[in-house]
């Protein structure tokens, strides 16, 4: 068996990766495939039998991932539910105002404009709302954590990112945070901020990095799990 190969069992593709390990491990991913780490010199018949025995579990995991990935497309219409700091609010469109803006009022997310807006314009207005919400609390939050951690960033910035919650340019000491974080509970933003500030102490995600995280934010694994689980469910 080559180092990398694949087999198909009942329409499920298993990607095999031979490694210097003792036990066989199976991981199911969103792409609908099962990735298998296979010990060297493990007989082909035993591999086949192990995959067959785990087939019900693999199918269950694929079904679970499939249900989580089916999310309704947001239309940005009145009555639609949007989130801010982990709480749900109905969206209300008001089209008889001169200024186009989004803001919170009486437990509603208001989107004002002069006439109808395109979907792109609505998205941009709500993105601005999320940006402003983070800007309100970040000066106090980052000052608090920089003092606690005894680190100093040169600046922090916000931008909408598709694949990352935050980044840190360790050379420039510049922190970037995803504006999407305003949709989730505040402790999620705090977790990402601490994560990026720790990079000013340790660039890699190694044991030293995790030790810093545990020292400054002991419940960081819980916060990370909360953020990622909500992200799969909400948006």
Image (cartoon, grey):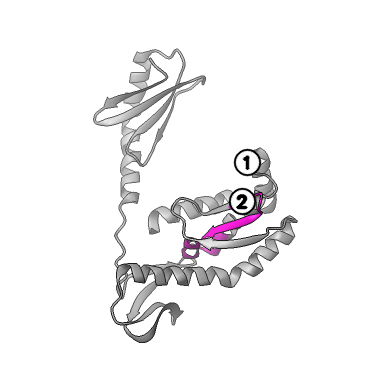
Residue 94: x and y in percent read 33, 82
Residue 94 located left or right of residue 153: left
The image quadrant where one finds the N terminus is: top left
Mark 1 = which residue? 204
Q: Residue at x 52, y 71 (%)?
A: 133
| Label 2 or label 1, whichever comes before in sequence order | 2
The answer to which quarter of the image holds residue 51 is: top left
Q: Compared with residue 207, is residue 101 higher up or lower down, i.e. above or below?
A: below
Q: Residue at x 69, y 65 (%)?
A: 143
Residue 42: x and y in percent read 43, 14
Q: Compared with residue 181, is residue 99 higher up or lower down, i.e. above or below?
A: below
Q: Which residues are magenta?
A: 168-189
Mark 2 = which residue? 169
Q: Residue at x 42, y 67 (%)?
A: 83
- Relative to the observer, which residue lies in front, 209 or 156? 156
Residue 39: x and y in percent read 46, 19
- Relative to the observer, which residue lies in front, 49 or 184? 184
Q: Secondary structure at mark 1?
A: loop
- Relative to the observer, which residue lies in front, 28 or 165? 165
The answer to which quarter of the image holds residue 45 is: top left
Q: Compared with residue 136, is residue 2 higher up or lower down, i.e. above or below?
A: above
The answer to which quarter of the image holds residue 139 is: bottom right
Q: Secondary structure at mark 2?
A: strand
Q: Can the viewer see residue 6?
A: yes
- Disc number lying in front (2 or 1): 2
């Amino acid at each position: 068996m080559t180092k990398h190969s694949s087999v198909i069992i009942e329409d499920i593709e298993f990607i095999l990766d031979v490694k210097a390990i003792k036990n066989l491990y199976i991981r199911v991913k969103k792409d609908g495939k099962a990735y298998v780490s296979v010990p060297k010199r493990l007989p082909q018949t035993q591999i086949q039998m192990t995959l067959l025995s785990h087939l019900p579990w693999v199918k269950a995991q694929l079904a679970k991932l499939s249900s989580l990935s089916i999310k309704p497309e947001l239309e940005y219409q009145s009555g639609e539910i949007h989130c801010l700091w982990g709480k749900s609010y109905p969206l209300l469109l008001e089209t008889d105002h001169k200024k186009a803006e989004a803001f919170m009022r009486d437990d509603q997310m208001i989107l004002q404009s002069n006439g109808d807006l395109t979907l792109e314009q609505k998205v941009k207005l709500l993105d601005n709302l999320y940006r402003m919400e983070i800007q309100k609390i970040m000066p106090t939050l980052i000052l608090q954590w920089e003092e606690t951690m005894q680190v100093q960033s040169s600046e922090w910035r916000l931008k909408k990112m598709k694949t990352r919650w935050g980044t840190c340019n360790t050379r420039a000491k510049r922190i970037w945070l995803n504006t999407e974080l305003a949709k989730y509970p505040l402790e999620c933003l705090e977790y990402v901020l601490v994560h990026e500030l720790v990079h000013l102490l340790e660039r890699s995600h190694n044991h030293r990095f995790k030790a810093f995280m545990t020292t400054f934010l002991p419940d960081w694994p819980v916060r990370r799990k909360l953020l990622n689980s909500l992200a799969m469910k909400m948006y």
